[in-house]
């Protein structure tokens, strides 16, 4: 059966989402059959890591968002006055190296073996090393930004290096060795290069802040930020989206030229952007920036177009999150164009904060939130279904995290995003924005914990019945 529907499963009818109505969350739905016909992806569940591997990352990520929200609620408007305030740098890294990095590292440990057939060396051991080390490193870096203590910068750098180099080697070997080919693999390989470049530049910056140096810190920060958000974050988002958007949302596939072109174009633009470290002709900056954001906008516009052509017309919460992320990416492009056209606004220090919030919260936190609402119920379902075999059916994906609860958290997240963006220009909103954002992230954390509880309780029931 699984062969017929073009999914490669561990055993016939085992772990085969199409066969069990993955799309509808109930067995044998029509959407499942549609997915079966439309999606020609290979999912290789025999290599899936234990569920604890991705979950430890997923369950931790939202609490870094809570910490960022509370930091804003505590520090208030000063934090958003410019991108260089200690609070802004600390908050940025709670989100990019806390929330984003946790979720993305966990997702790759699951995605690489299952979607690309890549063989990750001892995933449980990798997770047991990388996960706690990343938590410590982020906490040290945040403390370093807030106190400006040199030793904290050094300790954070060591923690990040020890965790991310190991992680990148293990995942990189799996991605190089996999026989799979295609745009997703290319994007994931470039994303790993992006992660290592971000790390190298970040560590250099941290040393530059800890000790007196002649390094061009401003250019280094811009190059580090571009590799982190574009070379790692967006590259990974695009690579994963090529695979999961058609699969989970039943859309047509991304056009081949676009799927192949976006990662290479982004990489080329990042390399040109990096030339500013060696002295960049002044006139290059804006065209390269707009080129990068234009490429991102093309990816976002195509995703929205494909979503409008999806075969299953229901608008579930995960889809709403993803559409919001894509709209934020387009808003980022138009905001940058506006700031360039109107330098009297663009030169205001708050303009960069606006762009940063749109990128980090509007695009990445939003997309990750939505993806987690698909991935976690699916993984619950997959692992339970393997445990119960064909005798019993596990709860539907809808029962893992009820739609109405996810929808409530989506509205809270939207409110948080609106408050945060408004707070850039209306500083009195900064503290309420921090509180609402912390609540939205806590909502995600609680919902994911609820999904874990559902998984454990059903697993115990299966064991008791056996
Ligand atoms: C892994 C993902 C990371 C991403 C996406 C990322 C992103 C960013 C961004 C966007 C900025 C600019 C902030 C602003 O303009 O307000 C920044 C600055 C900075 N990052 Fe990261 N970062 C990451 C990891 C790291 C790591 C691992 C370190 C060091 C151990 C680091 C150290 C720094 C430092 C020191 C600055 C501030 C430079 C300055 O004030 O001159 N970052 N990062």
Image: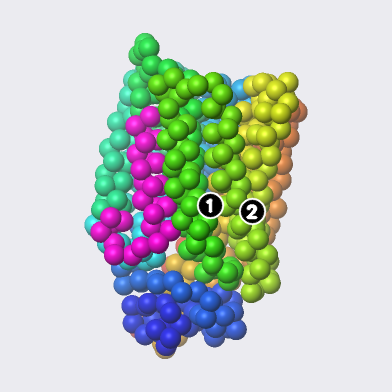
Q: What element carries label 1?
A: helix
Which residues fall within the magenta stretch?
Answer: 174-201
Residue 211 lies left or right of residue 435; in this view the side is left
Chain-order first, disc 1 or disc 2: 2
Quarter residue 108 falls in: bottom left
Q: Which of 153 and 4 is in front in this view?
A: 4
Q: Nearer the viewer, residue 9 or 3?
A: 3
Residue visible at 64% across and 40% down in the picture: 333
Is residue 102 visible to us here? no
Residue 157: horizontal and vertical position, in percent? 33, 29
The image shows residue 274, relative to residue 241, as above or below, that is above
Mark 1–mark 2 Cα distance, whole angstroms, equals 18 Å
Q: Nearer the viewer, residue 262 or 53?
A: 262
Residue visible at 34% across and 36% down in the picture: 160
| Residue 301 marker | 2
Q: Magenta span has 191?
A: yes
């Amino acid at each position: 059966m699984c062969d017929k529907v073009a999914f490669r499963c561990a055993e016939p009818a085992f772990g085969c989402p199409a066969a069990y109505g993955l799309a509808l969350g109930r067995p044998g739905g029509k959407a499942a059959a549609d997915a079966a016909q439309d999606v020609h992806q290979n999912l290789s569940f025999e290599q899936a890591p234990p569920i604890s591997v991705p979950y430890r990352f997923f369950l931790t990520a939202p609490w870094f968002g809570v910490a960022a929200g509370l930091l804003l609620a505590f520090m208030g408007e000063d934090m958003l006055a410019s991108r260089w305030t200690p609070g802004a740098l600390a908050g940025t890294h709670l989100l990019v190296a806390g929330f984003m990095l946790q979720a993305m590292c966990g997702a790759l440990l699951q995605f690489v073996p299952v979607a690309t057939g890549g063989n990750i060396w001892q995933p449980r051991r990798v997770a047991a090393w990388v996960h706690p080390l990343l938590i410590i490193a982020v906490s040290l870096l945040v403390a370093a930004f807030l106190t400006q203590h040199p030793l904290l910068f050094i300790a954070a750098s060591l923690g990040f290096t020890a965790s991310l180099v190991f992680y990148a080697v293990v995942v990189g070997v799996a991605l190089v060795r996999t026989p799979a080919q295609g745009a997703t693999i290319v994007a994931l390989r470039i994303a790993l290069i992006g992660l290592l470049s971000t790390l190298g530049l970040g560590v250099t910056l941290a040393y530059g802040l800890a000790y007196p140096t002649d390094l061009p810190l401003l250019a280094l920060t811009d190059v580090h930020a571009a590799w982190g958000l574009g070379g790692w974050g967006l590259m990974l988002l695009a690579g994963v989206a090529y695979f999961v958007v058609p699969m989970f949302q039943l859309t047509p596939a991304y056009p081949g030229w676009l799927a192949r072109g976006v990662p290479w174009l982004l990489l080329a633009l990042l390399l040109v952007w990096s030339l500013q470290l060696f002295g960049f002709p002044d006139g290059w900056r804006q065209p390269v920036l707009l080129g990068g954001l234009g490429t991102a906008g093309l990816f976002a516009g195509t995703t929205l177009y494909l979503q409008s052509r999806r075969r299953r017309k229901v608008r579930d919460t995960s889809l709403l999150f993803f559409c919001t992320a894509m709209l934020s990416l387009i808003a980022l492009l138009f905001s940058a164009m506006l700031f360039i056209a109107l330098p009297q606004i663009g030169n205001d220090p708050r303009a960069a904060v606006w762009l940063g919030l749109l990128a980090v919260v509007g695009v990445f936190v939003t997309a990750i939130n939505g993806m987690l609402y698909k991935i976690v119920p699916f993984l619950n379902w997959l692992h339970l279904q393997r445990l119960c075999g064909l005798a019993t059916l596990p709860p539907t994906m809808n029962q893992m995290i009820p739609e109405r609860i996810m929808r409530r958290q989506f509205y809270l997240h939207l409110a948080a995003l609106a408050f945060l963006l408004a707070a850039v220009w209306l500083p009195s909103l900064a503290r309420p924005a921090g509180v609402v954002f912390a609540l939205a992230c806590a909502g995600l954390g609680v919902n994911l914990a609820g999904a874990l509880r559902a998984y454990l309780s059903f697993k115990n029931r299966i064991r008791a019945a056996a």
